Image (cartoon, rainbow, N blue to C red):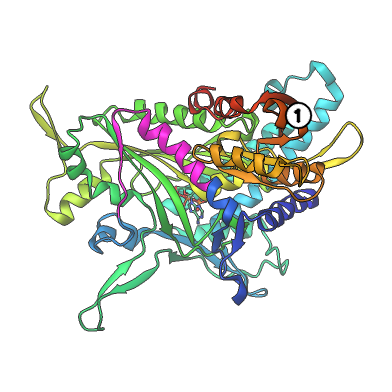
Amino acid sequence: MAKQEDTFKKVISHAKEYGFIFPSSEIYDGLSAVYDYAQNGVELKKNIREYWWKAMVQLHENIVGIDAAIFMHPTTWKASGHVDAFSDPLIDNKDSKKRYRADVLIEDYCAKIEKKIDKEVKKAEKRFGDAFNKEEFLNTNPRVLGYQEKINAILKRMGQSLEKEDLADVKALIEELGIVCPVSGSKNWTDVKQFNLMFGTKLGADAASSTELYLRPETAQGIFVNFANVQKTGRMKIPFGIAQAGKAFRNEIVARQFIFRMREFEQMEMQFFVKPGTEMEWYNKWKEERLNWHKSLGLGEDKYRFHDHDKLAHYANAAADIEFKFPFGFKELEGIHSRTDFDLKAHEEFSGKKLQFFDHETNTNYVPYVVETSVGLDRLFLAIFSTALQDETLEDGSTRTVLKIPSILAPTKIAVFPLLKKDGLPEKAKEIVADLKYDFMVAYDEKDAVGRRYRRQDALGTPFCVTLDHQTLEDNTVTIRNRDTMQQERVAISEIAAIVNEAISFKKWINK
Ligand code: ATP
């Protein structure tokens, strides 16, 4: 645990020190669970968004994008169910006065049991060596099966109680499991209550005429209310999708773990409209496609797993999370939900407008079903950043900190260094920068020894460093150094762009 915490602390401090993420309004001591993206963070975030957008919109002729406003007509949130049901179960510890999400306390308890399973696996691995078959062990070892059964029973009971709004049973479960407050260590809990997560605000100048608004807690509703407009103007035929990336706001009860859970964050969502009855087929297809998208980034296949939901939201008939192994354990990264026709039907009812599709083949109208994919951009940032940050011991025994961000996402693609600050080398280097900057984010650095400059760019995740020396002035060649292999190669200046383009080719990355 201590090691995990240290790793995570390192991630947070590296993000600040190297200009990726700052606490919001830090000169006023910051604002809880709100963060600002700094000069390098904004580039990385933009590149992740673009990688998603291209994969979803550009590669699918039947998916288009929109950018809906954050403010929406307040009836939207009545129709969607958010006014009545967008809440989390909270519980207070009477001794520490700390507030928790009841479901998270229970899930954390299960995560501890899961750790015990991991321990058993590690022990067995040692014992059996090469002959160890993990799958078989997990399916047959009585102790592991016992742990797994316990986890399943706890999560099932919690899911059912939350669905029935039986908050007394959620509290009873916390008490039966003997869950203690991590701060006070006591079991002195209040009752479990529901807490609405939407932020309210007002539109209009004076109190009498102003309208109560909400900051959107998800981007999806901006897509549903535009369904008919997009379908008609885009001449879209079922099945088709609408994608959107944008800010969402939630008054989270427990906002911790850096940018994992924020009060203002960005979602990238795609609602895919399908013929009723075909939704399960599409649900499974999107589960697979989204997992492959994540894996294409090369962070490691073992970093992902599915978690199929027992507890379904009020609108869903199937739901799964893609979980990622963050420095603090496996947690939700993306949700894939089969939302039925709940949203479009509700908006039809509340607006009095038809939100249907006319099927020319069967000459019938129907309200489409929806399969959605919903990923948090900030969580994705954290997943990539925390996995990429590595301390390496080199062959000569020295160490380096390197940010092995997938090169296609790296904030700066190329750093250009003149070996010396004289003999016309800086001028020549600046010429190279001036040429490359039309196609790439390029940095120029002439300060300190080249080794130090390499280290600085390693820590920023820059995949290529180009160094000019006296030979450059004679034959227009430079050395190009690869961040990950640290190999240097002598190439012509005219080849740099092609080498970098090859390394950051979207076609190559996405088809990995
Ligand atoms: P959680 O259970 O972690 O609160 P959720 O199930 O409420 O998440 P969804 O409503 O399905 O989340 O939202 C889709 C995605 O948006 C999540 O998978 C996550 O990546 C992201 N997300 C949700 N809430 C936050 C938040 N407070 N901060 C950052 N990202 C978030």
* Residue at screen point 60% across, 24% down: 495
* Residue sitting at the far top: 131
Q: Nearer the viewer, residue 376 or 109?
A: 376
- Compared with 237, 13 (above or below) is below
* Residue at screen point 39% across, 64% down: 198
Q: Does 284 sit left or right of 47 as displayed? A: left
Residue on which the image places disc 1:
471
Q: Nearer the viewer, residue 66 or 257?
A: 66
* Residue 413 in sight here: no
In the rendering, at what x and y percent does residue 223 appear? 28, 47
* Residue at screen point 44% across, 49% down: 267
**Which quarter of the figure has residue 413?**
top right
In the rendering, at what x and y percent does residue 18 appear? 68, 54
In the rendering, at what x and y percent does residue 193 appear? 47, 67
* Residue sitting at the far right: 397
Q: Secondary structure at mark 1?
A: helix
- Over which residues does the magenta segment extend? 45-68
* Residue 342 in sight here: yes
Q: Nearer the viewer, residue 171 or 382?
A: 382
**Which quarter of the figure has residue 66?**
top left
